Amino acid sequence: MRKIKLVAILMTLIMMLSFVTGCGQNGEDQAKKADSNYPEKPINMVIAFTAGGSSDVQARIMQKYWNKYVNQQWTFVYKTGAGGAIGFTEIANSKPDGYTIGGVNIPHMVLQPIGQGAKFKPEDFAYIAQVVNDPLVLAVRKDSKFKSVQEIIDFAKANPEKLKTGIVGTYTGSHLALLDFQDKTGTKMAQIVYKGTADQNAALLGGEIDVMMGFYNDVMRNLEQMTILGITTDERYEPLPDVPTVKELGIDIISDVRRGFVAPKGIGEDQLNFLRETFNKIANDPDYIADMEKAGQPHDYLNGPEFEKYVMQQQEEAKVLLEKFDLIKN
C-alpha cells in the first residue's frame, strides 16, 4: 500500500514538473514568436535637433530606406535644446521595448554628462550603428569681408569678443572646436549659441553672426550663399579640394561629429539584432549611399559594437579636453 502511495506521489510530481516545464516552454515560444514579428507597430524616432538640420536630414534619408526593408514606419519625435542633451535624455529614459530609438551625435553625447551633469551617460544606450562622419568647417556669407581663416584670426585678435561666432549648443563638437581654436590662435570671440544647424545657418545668412563653426553638411544646403574658409581635417577634404585645412595655417585642430543611432539600454537582444541588421542593409544600399552624397552627408558606417567602442574611447579623451578648459562639472 505504501508503495502504491509512493508511486502515486511520484507520478503526481512528474506531471506537475511536466506542466511547469511546458508552460515555461510555451512562454519562451510566445516570446520568440513576438520577437519574430517585430516590429508590430510604428517606432518612435527621437531627433535631438531642430527639423531641417543635419541630424534630421540624415534620419529622413535613413527613413526612406527603412521603409524599403521594413513594413512599419517611423514616427518622428523632436526633443530639441541643450545641444542635443534633451533628446539624448529622452532616448535613455524611454522604455526599452524596441519601439523608441533615436539619433545621437558624438562628441556631444560624451561631453554633456561630464561637463553639464546631463541626466544620461554613454553606458545608458544600446548602439545600433554610426552612419556619418562630418568634419567641422569655418564658414561666412558670400559677401563677407573675411576671405580667409587668417583674416578671421587677425580681426579677432585686434577686436577681442567682437567677432560674433555661431555654434550649435554647448558641450558639443562645435563648442569644443571653438574653444580649441581660440586657445590655439590666442583669440577671443563672441560665442552665439543656437539650438540647431537650421537656426545657425539662418543667423549667418541673416547677418546675425559673422562666422559659423559648423559641420560640412551644415553648410552644403546653403553653399551658394556661403563660403567655406577652412576645414578641420588632417588633409584636404576630397569633396572640397580647394578649401585649406586649418592645419595648413599651423593650427593643429582635427574635429568632426559622428552621427549614429541608439536604443535605450535593456532592449531585447533579438530586437537589437534586427535593428543592427536592418541598418547594415541600409548603409550598404547603393541608392542610399547616392542619396547621402547628394545631401552632402559624409557616409561613414560603423556597426553597433564598433560604434560603441568608438564612443567609449571618445569619453576618455573628452575628460582630458574638458579638464584642460576647466569645464568638468563637479
Image (cartoon, helix red, strand yellow):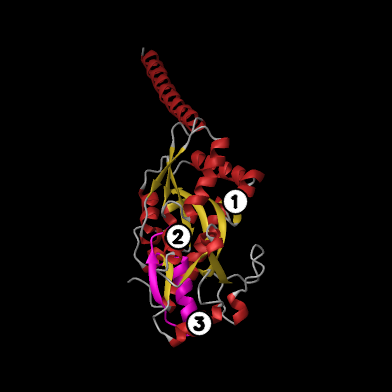
Q: Which quadrant is the N terminus positioned in?
A: top left
> What residue range appears in magenta?
169-198
Residue drawn at the location 43% of the way across and 61% of the way down = 202
What is the crowding at mark 1: few (fewer than 14 residues within 10 Å), some, or many (at least 20)? many
User: Is residue 98 on the magenta stretch?
Assistant: no
Residue drawn at the location 50% of the way across and 48% of the way down = 59
Residue wearing tag 2: 197
Query: Mark 2 belongs to which amino acid?
Result: Thr
User: Is residue 187 on the magenta stretch?
Assistant: yes
20 to the left or right of 277: left
Dot 3 or dot 2: first in sequence order is 3
Nearer the observer: mark 3 or 1; the answer is 3
Give the Cα distance between marks 1 and 2. Answer: 18 Å
Query: Mark 1 belongs to which amino acid?
Result: Met
Q: Nearer the viewer, residue 229 or 298?
A: 229
The kind of secondary structure element at disc 1 is: helix
Residue 56 appears in the picture as rendered: yes
Query: Mark 3 belongs to which amino acid?
Result: Ile
User: Residue 135 appears at what percent x and percent y?
Assistant: 56, 65
